[in-house]
Each structure stands twice: as structure tokens, then as C-alpha cells.
Image: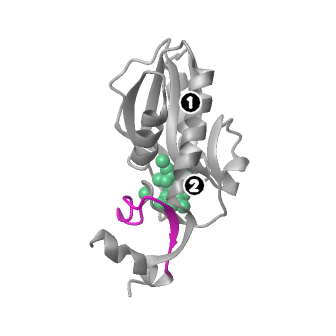
Amino acid sequence: MHAADMGKDLEKVLIPEDELQAKIKELAARIDADYAGKDLLLVGVLKGAVMVMADLARALRNQVQMDWMAVSSYGAGTKSSGVVRVLKDLDTDIMGRHVLIVEDIIDSGLTLDWLINNLKGRNPASLEICTALRKPDAVKVPIDVKYVGFDIPNEFVIGYGLDYAERYRNLPFIGTLAPHVYNGQ
Ligand code: 5GP
Ligand code: MG
Ligand code: MG
């Protein structure tokens, strides 16, 4: 599908591109201040975090390194189960490193909870989380997320890295899908 044709699949734009970009710059300024003089490793979670990572990293003034993990949550449908499989591990040894996990969205928080425990076991100097979006359910799993872009309602969203059946990731804003997309009409 051509990008120009994606409009008919949209229900609404939840967060426009300029608001997303402004928020990412705010988060970047905080991160720059908090990690001043420190060597920071950004860990992006594939594939959803690609856009956040690219924008955040370029908005930072400090020099950082970037690495990626790909994980898959076992579980039926759109709900994650908390049972996680590593599809691609880090290339970097994070022992003694300051690590910031970069996420697209925290929904139940189960995936992130698993990831935090996994990375903590590798003895980083510090471990914090930055997420573009967070849903209300996430508060049920007690995860201390230091950098949150937007708290959003409990709706399935797409764009800015987030997909529905691997589509819509390249939309530069966050939106919801029209019902006909799910109904296959
Ligand atoms: P959690 O383990 O926090 O429930 O799920 C995290 C993962 O589920 C996210 O990284 C993302 O891949 C997916 N996810 C959760 N909510 C949404 C959503 O509203 N839209 C999309 N496209 N993916 C979501
Ligand atoms: Mg993610
Ligand atoms: Mg997905």
C-alpha cells in the first residue's frame, strides 16, 4: 500500500507528528542532563522502538552507543503472556554500563518486566527505561519507568513504529485504525 493510501484505514490521529517530536526532544534534554559525563548505552527493543530510538538518539547532545534486542512474547492474539523468547540478543556486554532501555509502548508491562530482570542479571551499572507510550494497564505491574512520553487510553494504536499485522509502522504519528481494517473489509 502506498503511504498516501493509509488515510482511509485510520480512525483518528491520537498524537500528531509535531507533538511526538516535541516530546522526544523534551525526553532527550532530560536524558542529556541525567547522564552528563556518563557513557550511555541505549538498548532498543525491535521492531517497535526503531522510530523512537532514531529520533531520541538524534535529539541527544551527548554521545551514546546503541544496541538492539528482539524479543517475542508467547501468547495468543494481542495480549502478551509474560513468557518471553529472545530472538536477537545484545551484541554488547552491559556489565558495568549505564543502560537505558528504549521502548515504543508499555501495555501490560509483562514483556518489559521480563527484560528488566534479564538485563539486571548481567550487572549493568544502572538500568532505566524510556518509553514513547504507556497504557493504563501498565500501572498494574510495578515498573519504575523514568522517561514516559505519553500516557494514552486503553486503545490499540499504530504508527511511529507500532504495527498491526506488520503494517502502519512508518506512519509518523500515533493513530487508531478504522474497524474495517480489523474486519478485513
Ligand atoms: P506488554 O508486554 O507491555 O503487554 O506488551 C508490549 C508489546 O505489545 C509492545 O512492545 C508492542 O509490541 C505490543 N503492544 C502493546 N500495545 C500495543 C498497541 O496498542 N498497539 C500495537 N501496535 N502494539 C502494542
Ligand atoms: Mg516494544
Ligand atoms: Mg506488534
Name the residue at 66% across, 50% down: 138
Residue 9 in picture, x, y percent from top left: 42, 78
Q: Secondary structure at mark 1?
A: helix
| Amino acid on which the number 2 mark rests in the picture | Glu
- Above or below residue 177? Residue 152 is above
Name the residue at 44% across, 34% down: 57
The image quarter containing residue 148 is: top right
- Tell me whether the residue at label 2 lies in contact with that at label 1, contact meaning CB atoms closer than 8 angstroms: no
Q: Secondary structure at mark 2?
A: helix
In the rendered image, the quadrant that contains the N terminus is bottom left
Q: Left or right of 112: which side holds 94?
A: left
Q: Earlier in the sequence, mark 2 or mark 1?
A: 2
In space, the residues marked 2 and 1 are separated at their CA atoms by: 32 Å
Q: Left or right of 46: which side holds 153?
A: right
The image quarter containing residue 89 is: top left
| Amino acid on which the number 1 mark rests in the picture | Asn
Q: Which residues are magenta?
A: 163-178
Which-is-in-front pick, marks 2 and 1? 2
- The residue pinned by badge 1 equals 117
Nearer to us in this view, 75 or 26: 26
- The residue pinned by badge 2 equals 19
Residue 102 in sight from this viewpoint:
yes
